[in-house]
Image (cartoon, rainbow, N blue to C red):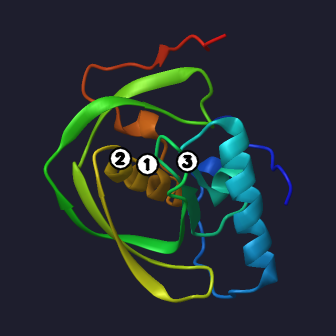
């Protein structure tokens, strides 16, 4: 495994649409493993392949407090949404910034695992928010594009 560089807002790769994964092989598994390590080391709860410069429909995430609910999503599709929630979001590609975004409160996702088998996932609250945020990355959308009306990005101080 290796840490990958996280691309920031200036990098045009973050605004491009990712291509579906068709080959479920060692190259994909290496990417998934690297993304997992990068996400955990950076303190994020999710990471999409474009954030490490790879235009493929791949997401890793773990929103659990004890960091033991790791999920890999390949070619994810949101199949159902319900309710809404409004809250602050941040992003590893926009370090030190947050903004208020309204997202669905419940999200169902269909995605493939690292072997190519289709799986179903359901998320509520933060998990639903993370599903939407990371899948947006695969379509070149950043959370700042979805700020609630009248909202602007604000700086958050890093804890020491």
Q: Is residue 82 left or right of residue 149?
A: left
**With respect to residue 135, does 22 lie above or below?**
below
Q: Is residue 40 left or right of residue 83?
A: right
SS at mark 3 in the image: loop
**N-terminal of the two: label 1 or label 3?**
3
Looking at this rendering, what residue extends furthest in the left direction? 83
| Residue 9 on image: x %, y % | 64, 35
The numbered dot on residue 129 is 2
SS at mark 2 in the image: helix
The numbered dot on residue 133 is 1
Residue for point 70% across, 66% down: 32
| Residue 122 on image: x %, y % | 30, 65
Q: Nearer the viewer, mark 2 or mark 1?
A: 2
Q: CA distance from mark 1 to mark 3?
A: 19 Å
Q: Which residue is mark 3?
A: 67
Q: CA distance from mark 2 to mark 3?
A: 17 Å
Q: Is residue 53 visible?
A: no
**N-terminal of the two: label 2 or label 3?**
3
The numbered dot on residue 49 is none
**With respect to residue 67, does 80 lie above or below?**
below
Residue for point 52% across, 52% down: 62
Depth check, front residue: 68 or 139: 68
Quadrant for residue 107, please give it. Answer: bottom left
Classify mark 1: residues with Cα within 10 Å, few (<14), some (14-19) or many (20+).
many
Depth check, front residue: 73 or 64: 64
The C terminus - image quarter: top right
Depth check, front residue: 61 or 135: 61
The N terminus - image quarter: bottom right
């Amino acid at each position: 495994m290796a840490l990958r560089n996280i691309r920031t807002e200036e990098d045009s790769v973050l605004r491009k649409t990712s291509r579906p994964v068709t080959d479920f092989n060692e190259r994909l598994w290496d990417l998934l493993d690297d993304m997992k390590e990068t996400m955990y080391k950076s303190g994020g709860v999710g990471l999409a392949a474009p954030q490490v410069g790879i235009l493929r429909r791949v997401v890793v995430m773990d929103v659990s407090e004890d960091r033991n609910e790791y999920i890999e999503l390949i070619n994810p599709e949101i199949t159902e949404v319900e309710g809404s929630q409004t809250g602050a979001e941040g992003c590893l590609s926009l370090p030190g910034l947050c903004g208020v975004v309204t997202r669905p409160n419940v999200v169902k996702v269909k995605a493939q695992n690292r072997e190519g088998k289709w799986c179903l996932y359901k998320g509520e609250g933060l998990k639903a928010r993370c599903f939407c945020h990371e899948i947006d990355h695969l379509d070149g959308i950043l959370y700042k594009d979805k700020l609630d009306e009248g909202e602007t990005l604000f700086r958050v101080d890093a804890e020491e």
